[in-house]
Image: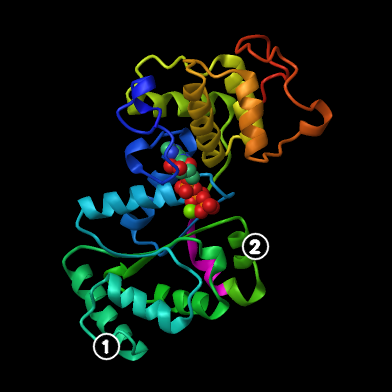
Amino acid sequence: MYNAFFGFRENPFNLSPDPAFLYRSPQHEEALANLIYGVHSRKGFIVLTGEVGTGKTTMLECLRDYLESQYVEFAFLFNSRINTEQFFEMIAYDLDLRCAHKSKTEVLFALNHLLIQQANEGRTTVLIVDEAHNLEWDVLEEIRLLGNLENPRLGKLLQIVLAGQPELDRKLDAPNLRQLKQRIVLRCSLAPFTLAEAVEYVNSRLKKAGMPEPSVFSDGVMQEIHLRSQGIPRLINAICDNLLLTAFAAEEKQATFAMLDEVCQDMRLEWPGKRLRGRSPISADSSEGAPLFSPREQF
Ligand SMILES: Nc1ncnc2c1ncn2[C@@H]1O[C@H](COP(=O)(O)OP(=O)(O)OP(=O)(O)O)[C@@H](O)[C@H]1O
Ligand SMILES: [Mg+2]
């Protein structure tokens, strides 16, 4: 809607996890490197955790792109509220197994065949499960058993990536899952952005969308965006998108604190210190000015 006004080729703050807009923060870079390394080293289980909206699915989408580019077979389960029958059916569908998809025995047989065939060709096979914190206990148990598929010569036949909210870590700590927990060889986690990362993140999105010299968010406004989003990329996107829309409606090329207040109120956003301070006391139509809080580098 506002693209032409600001000179964007496309929307800079889309909410979908799009690898084309990937900002390689050190922790995202490390997480992706771990995922790729874990898959290649054929060690078995890899776990990726992070709070809501920190970029887990984006990382998995990057891994998917990578696996496709390397012709590695994989199954990607993005819906984890499934029972064991649906779990095997989805694996069979994704891996295009030639068998009765509803028969667990047949799926296991065909899967084993595929895994050995791939391994003999020097390839591995990957199972990716997003939102894994929602998995039922018996599905987790099936996943653990799949992780046992191994060949003394070829190593682990199926690499399993589980991604989810921090509850996943707590779930894996449960006594009945200790066997699975012991098999996890790599763990990575995503934290909210620091202020410096948030600034780079927003600028990288603006640049990728076609604004080579981003000036739409002043330093002060950017600090407030970081504070109010608590460094969560999805919230940063939502705030920035709404700010651009509000600035466009006002025919302004720069977002102001007043616009930010309005946007946060519309989004019913809560952040630390909101009640103490109330709304931004900085001049309603100013986008400049000293920061109200000292910049928070970490959350
Ligand atoms: N490193 C990054 N580079 C570019 N965009 C990112 C990055 N991290 C997160 N995002 C963006 O933030 C938003 C949320 O990311 P994503 O959906 O991957 O989070 P999530 O951790 O999977 O969230 P949830 O817990 O709700 O599933 C998306 O719009 C995504 O594009
Ligand atoms: Mg996700």
Rounded to the nearest angstrom, the CA distance separating label 2 from label 1 is 35 Å
Give the SS element for disc 2: helix
The disc label shown at residue 234, or none? none
Q: Which mark is nearer the camera, 2 or 1?
A: 1
Q: Does residue 67 show up?
A: yes
Give how far across and how far down residue 228 sits, in percent: 65, 32
Quadrant placement of the C terminus: top right
Query: Viewed as shown, does residue 244 lie left or right of 290?
Result: left
Q: Is mark 2 within 8 Å of ligand 1?
A: no
- Membership of 185 in magenta stretch: yes
Q: Along the line of sight, which residue is nearer the eye, 134 or 251? A: 251
Relative height, residue 106 to residue 133 (above, below) = below
Relative height, residue 85 to residue 15 (above, below) = below
Give how far across and how far down residue 85 sits, in percent: 42, 84
Residue depicted at x 38% and y 14%: 213
**Circle 2 Cα neighbour tier, 10 Å, few/some/many (<14 / 14–19 / ≥20):** few
Q: Indicate the quadrant where residue 214 lies.
A: top left
Q: Along the line of sight, which residue is nearer the eye, 269 or 5? A: 5
Query: Viewed as shown, does residue 7 lie left or right of 81?
Result: left
**What is the span of residues highlighted in magenta in the rendered image?**
179-188
Q: Which residue lies under the disc numbered 1?
A: 100
The disc label shown at residue 170, or none? 2
Give the SS element for disc 1: loop
Quadrant placement of the N terminus: top left
Residue depicted at x 54% and y 19%: 255
In the image, what residue type sits under mark 2? Arg
- Membership of 191 in magenta stretch: no
Give how far across and how far down residue 106 sits, in percent: 29, 89
Query: Viewed as shown, does residue 153 lie left or right of 197?
Result: left
